[in-house]
Image: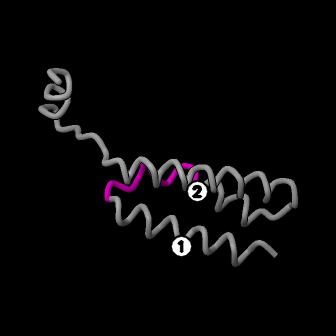
Amino acid sequence: MDSLNGVESLGFSLPSPAYLAGAILFSLIGFAAYRYGKTTARPRVKWIGVVLMFYAYAIPQTWLLFLVGLMLCAGIYWFHD
């Protein structure tokens, strides 16, 4: 616990379990979309998959992580044909 207090005193905070679960879930969906887009020659799906894998690094709020992730998943559904 001492090291956790030291990290928090530097201005860093650990993400919530919901944030971590969302980041892992959307990253796995992004990896699957990337593979699907690559094998079926659908560049939009492939690039949405790449964004899904890495966008969690840029979004600090949990509610925004889920909102953007769901919107990107809807984009995969929209462009899958």
Q: Residue at x 51, y 48 (%)?
A: 24
Q: Which mark is residue 4?
A: none
Q: Is residue 55 rendered magenta in the image?
A: yes
For residue 14, which quarter of the picture?
top left
Side of 57 relative to 24 (left or right): left
Horizontally, residue 27 falls left or right of residue 63, namely right
Q: Secondary structure at mark 1?
A: helix
Q: Quadrant of the C terminus?
A: bottom right
Identify residue for label 2.
51
Q: Give percent across and percent down for residue 67.
A: 44, 70
- The amino acid type of the residue labelled 1 equals Met
Instruction: Please tell me whether mark 2 or mark 1 is closer to you in this view.
Output: 1
Residue at screen point 77% across, 51% down: 35
Magenta range is 51-61
Of all residues, the one furthest to the top in this rendering is 2
- In this view, the residue in front, 13 or 55, is 13
Is residue 27 shown left or right of residue 17? Answer: right
